[in-house]
Image (cartoon, rainbow, N blue to C red):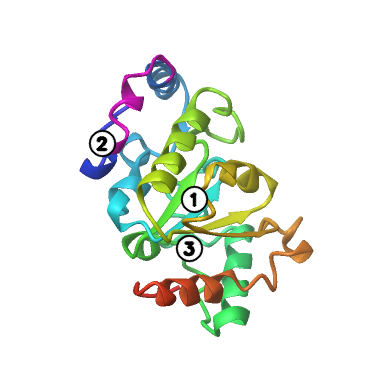
Amino acid sequence: MNTDIEKSWEIALSEYFKTSSFLDLVKFVKDEYKTFIVYPQQKDIFNAFNLTPLDKVKVVIIGQDPYHNPDQAHGLCFSVKENIKPPPSLRNIYKEIATDIGVDKDITDGFLENWAKQGVLLINSVLTVRKKTPGSHVKKGWEGFTDEVIKQISDNTNNVVFLLWGNYAKKKGLIVDRNKHLVLEAAHPSPFSAYNGFFGCKHFSETNKYLKSKGFDEIVW
């Protein structure tokens, strides 16, 4: 596993990278890539961090683990590679954007790199997965790493918007200092739960209203 990561993240996470839990995780992931087909490609594992430096983070969206089908995962949660049709959860995100802020997204394009470059950190809790085996890298060490990431953002930045969709993300967000940051919670955009509180949550307009009030550029969703 290539642990090269953008400089601001490298500095922030330098102590964590020395821990036994992270070193054990690196060994596990390296062995998995040697033995199985694993997504995303190794060069894309830290894609979210390389596109969104720590000092540029304005919004955090937390997913679970990467897409496990071919040609989808590329290191950004909910996003798929260029020219790949958006999966159901992302299509529901696009629907909410359309009703919330009136922007009709191209439903044939699920590539969210432009969000990442604007300061939207799109992280999964678990950064790797075996092909067609969802959850296969759960409880192998990634959760501790991404908890540390959230803690670094919470402790060392101000006025970041955390979008927590679904119970898994909500639990992950318990680390966040809500006196310094805005936390918005809703149901997961999955077809199984989107009608239970994701549709109508207005998180995209709420995010931009908050960013504007703090003097930041709004996100072009």
Residue 133 point in image, percent of width and height: 60, 32
User: Which comes before the other along the chain, label 1 or label 3?
Assistant: 1
Please tell me whether residue 16 belongs to the stretch shown in magenta.
yes
- In this view, which residue lies farthest toward the front? 179
Please tell me whether residue 196 belongs to the stretch shown in magenta.
no
User: Residue 110 shows which numbered tag?
Assistant: 3
Q: Amino acid at mark 2?
A: Glu
Question: Which quadrant is home to the N terminus?
Answer: top left
Q: Are marks 1 and 3 in contact (CB under 8 Å)?
A: no
- Res. 127 in view: no
Residue 192 point in image, percent of width and height: 76, 55
User: Residue 119 shows which numbered tag?
Assistant: none
- Res. 204 in view: yes
Q: Amino acid at mark 1?
A: Cys
- Residue at left offset 28%, top offset 29%: 14
* Callout 1: SS: loop
User: Residue 10 shows which numbered tag?
Assistant: 2
